[in-house]
Image (cartoon, grey):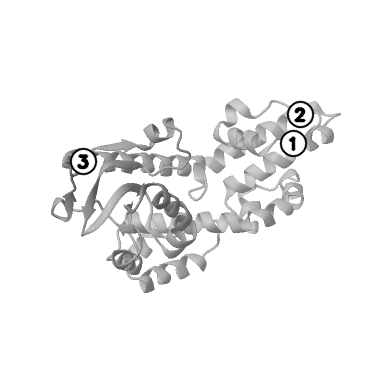
Amino acid sequence: MRLAEYESIRAHLLSLPCARYPDMDALKAAHPGVSLDTLVSICAQESSRRIKAHHGRHARAISDHARRYLAGEDIFDVAHDADFPPCQLMRLLVEHVLGVGHKAAGALIRDPRGRVPTHPPPESPAGAHHADDLAAGAALCERIRFDVERCVAWDHVASPAVDASRHSAGREYEDLLEEKLNALGVPFVSEGSLRAEGHAKTPDVKLELPIAVRGRVVNWIDSKASFCDPIVHYERGAEQFQGYVDRFGPGMVVYWLGVVDEIAEESELRGDVLVVDDFPDESEVTKLKLTPRV
């Protein structure tokens, strides 16, 4: 995908409300040469950036959001007016209303039936408000439990199910990378083994013997279940990959869901990190051998 087409897709996504999932059929029709998986990845990345950018503003305004919610307004109406994904807003509300920490609120969102209390904690804002009306406090907790389940079921932008799907895809592509290397007979050390040896930040595989890909030496390979745009590669990935280069030498990153063409082309001309959108064909790979010392 050329940079101009990516920028066109991104401009369309930025024109939509933050909490609205785009019409993928229309987006695919507008960009027939782009796979649906790639479009989904671009949408997910842009949603994540916007959520992070707006999170602080909504955290600061949580008292106003909570006031509307506690007055009986539906969580989806509050989220719509705030232009923020329901699951994210519900998490902030849980933190504020029940007085729980960020991690506890996340666990509650993932398991509302097991984590939402039957009554608000006495020290929480909700507990203090309903100190003289235990029935009202219990009803509020039941409403929170029900609304968390609704948000998880209907939020296609930022729910635990979305996060789990991304994690699962990442693991599947890491497995695919290892399968490709095994098929070529290229020995490697996995990320888990490297960390067991004490390495803090590691690529997904460190090759025991380097290979050459399109004439470039590759000592390590990192697998990314995402699309490679300029922000992903230059702003987020550059420091990470440079750390691998400093420790292990030149390497390769596979962005399985696509790469902006200009980034891949530049990586073939210069630098120590080759960027590709698929594992190279066997014809493009040369297995290097160590020359024994005489």
Q: Which residue is mark 1?
A: 99
Q: Which numbered disc, 1 or 3, marks the residue that appears first in the sequence?
A: 1
Q: Is residue 179 left or right of residue 231?
A: left
User: Which amino acid is tagged 1?
Assistant: Gly
Circle 2 residue: 121
Q: Position of residue 93 (x, y in %)?
A: 69, 43
Vertical placement of residue 231 versus 223, above or below: below
Picture quadrant of residue 30:
bottom left
Q: Is residue 21 visible?
A: no
Please give the label number shown on residue 186. 3
| Pointer 2 with pointer 1, Cβ within 8 A | yes
Identified by mark 3, the residue type is Val
Q: Secondary structure at mark 1?
A: loop
Residue 2, position in %: x, y? 33, 70
Q: Position of residue 267 (x, y in %)?
A: 33, 64
Q: Earlier in the sequence, mark 2 or mark 1?
A: 1
Q: Residue furthest left?
A: 283
Q: How many marks?
A: 3
Marks 2 and 1, Cα distance to the nearest angstrom?
Answer: 8 Å
Residue flagged by tag 2: what amino acid is it? Pro
Quarter of the image with the C terminus is top left
**Residue 223 location (% of width, % of height):** 35, 47
In front: 269, or 179? 269
Instruction: Measure the C-alpha gap from mark 2 to mark 3.
Output: 57 Å
Image height check: is 242 above or below 205?
below
Q: Nearer the viewer, mark 2 or mark 3?
A: 3
x 83%, y 36%: residue: 129
Q: Residue furthest right?
A: 132
Q: Nearer the viewer, residue 221 or 215?
A: 215
Q: Gap between marks 1 and 3, in whole Å? A: 53 Å
Q: Nearer the viewer, mark 1 or mark 3?
A: 3
Looking at the picture, tell me which residue is in the foreground, 38 or 268: 268
